[in-house]
Image (cartoon, helix red, strand yellow):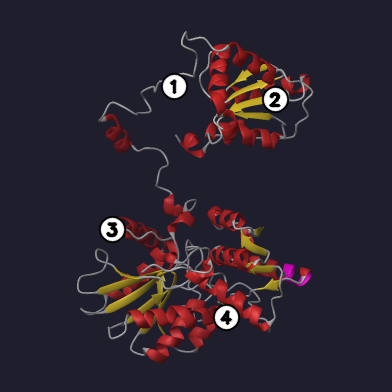
Amino acid sequence: MNRIFDNILQTIGDTPVVRLNRLAPEGIELYVKIESFNPMGSVKDRLALEVIEQAEKSGALKPGQTVIEATSGNTGIGLAMVCAQKGYPLVVTMSESFSIERRRMMRFLGAKVVLTPAALKGSGMLAKATELAEKHGWFLCRQFENEANADAHSRTTAPEILQAFEGKRLDYWVSGFGTGGTLKGVGRVLAAKRPDTQVVVCEPDNSPILGSGIAQSRRNDGTPSESHPMFRPHLMQGWSPDFIPKLTEDALAMKFVSRVVPVSGDDALRLSRELARKEGIFVGISGGATLAGALTIARGASVGTTLLCMLPDTGERYLSTPLFDDIPADMTREEHEISHSTPGYRFDVATPAAAPKADATGNVPADALRTLEQIVNDPAQPVTLFALEWCEFCWSVRKMFARYEIPYRSIDLDSVAYQKDDRGGTIRAALRQQTGQATIPQIYIGGQHIGGASDLFDACKSGRLQEMLGQSGVAFNRSVDTDPYSFLPGWLQAR
């Protein structure tokens, strides 16, 4: 059914429940609720919207006020979406140990990301958020204690589950815990509406803070006063911080949690990959971990048992984590063999370059050569880059110039401005005749031809580039100490 929404926030929730067909033990009905269908790819979109909208209604959040929160990433990404749509500045604090993809996504959405030392764990990023909020008068979301977090799931997630299993058996609902909002919000509704459903919570086997039975020490406002003594660093980002969140503690106190299941990091990785390769479902490490806990229950269950497992987020924000350690960027040996099974379009076979435009006699028009000479010998703009607008090698040169703060003129030969009368094509033909090189980019400094991207990088490493810039009176940042080849596209560096 086609639907039209007034804004992106209206698309949060209503995530699908999907049956597993190849990973479920025989005779067991195993379903997953795929929270990556939320607009920012995780279950935390739900709490982000609820926390902000409840704060707006109560007056705790004023128009234009800065929002701040401590996050492992998913809550911050959800908040970045909500704040972008509603017009609030957002600052997040995050431990440096969490994946790079998360901080880049938040910054892409307009948030500011303040990193805290990994050694200070989750408590450190939480304390930093509190410190900043108090200093600047910002609105602190307090996702670990905020009842709006649990309310989001009682209002949306739980009713979706009840509707999906109306008139059907549901013996177990399995979830991990980060803040405890999903656990408390869904768990209390199931306890009231489906008391036949057992609630199972999973945690890392090497960090059994719930299973230990040791209480969390707290300040008067409910925040943790120190790390839990049983916490150990673990693989599941977003799961189980170094303290028991107040919402999680509430869920345990309410007595609706039937069982705490420890899960190993190896099982989390394995099942995340198996979900992708056997079911076509792409999730992160926490999704694989929760499925591992569900399978632990399923293996001891009777025939006909039905389980629902929460899959909190997408696998795309784990590219820099151990989940993708054995996934190469370059072609494997088998992929090379497939490529070599036919003769064309291969890396080991040179592809002839397209010839630049020339006249019927093969000569470059004289006015094109004059235009080229005028461009490269302009004393007001000594550094000239002949480029294509969206060529990755050209962008590598642009990035290097930006890092070194080198002012330059870019002649984008394929741009709209150079398409009229094929100006770009004739200039490129002139470049080829003058330099003997058909490739782009080509760089000139003070009228002298440097060459392409790799020639420029070599000149930088040898010091020749810096010497030429000085001779041409070009000021630049001499303190940069970066390998210029690092500016090349990642796929080329990997290969």
* Residue 381 in picture, x, y percent from top left: 73, 25
Q: Nearer the viewer, mark 2 or mark 3?
A: 2
- Compute the Cα span from label 3 to label 1: 44 Å
Crowd class of label 1 (few under 14; some 14 to 19; many from 20; radius 10 Å): few
Q: Nearer the viewer, mark 2 or mark 1?
A: 1
Q: Which residue lies under the disc numbered 3?
A: 278
Disc on res. 383:
2
The residue segment tinted magenta is 131-135
- Compute the Cα span from label 2 to label 4: 56 Å
Q: What SS does tag 4 mark?
A: helix
Q: Which residue lies under the disc numbered 1?
A: 354
* Residue 318 in picture, x, y percent from top left: 47, 55
Q: Residue at x 32, y 81 (%)?
A: 165
Predominant secondary structure in magenta?
helix
* Relative depth, front residue between 304 and 215: 304
- Image quarter of residue 298: bottom left
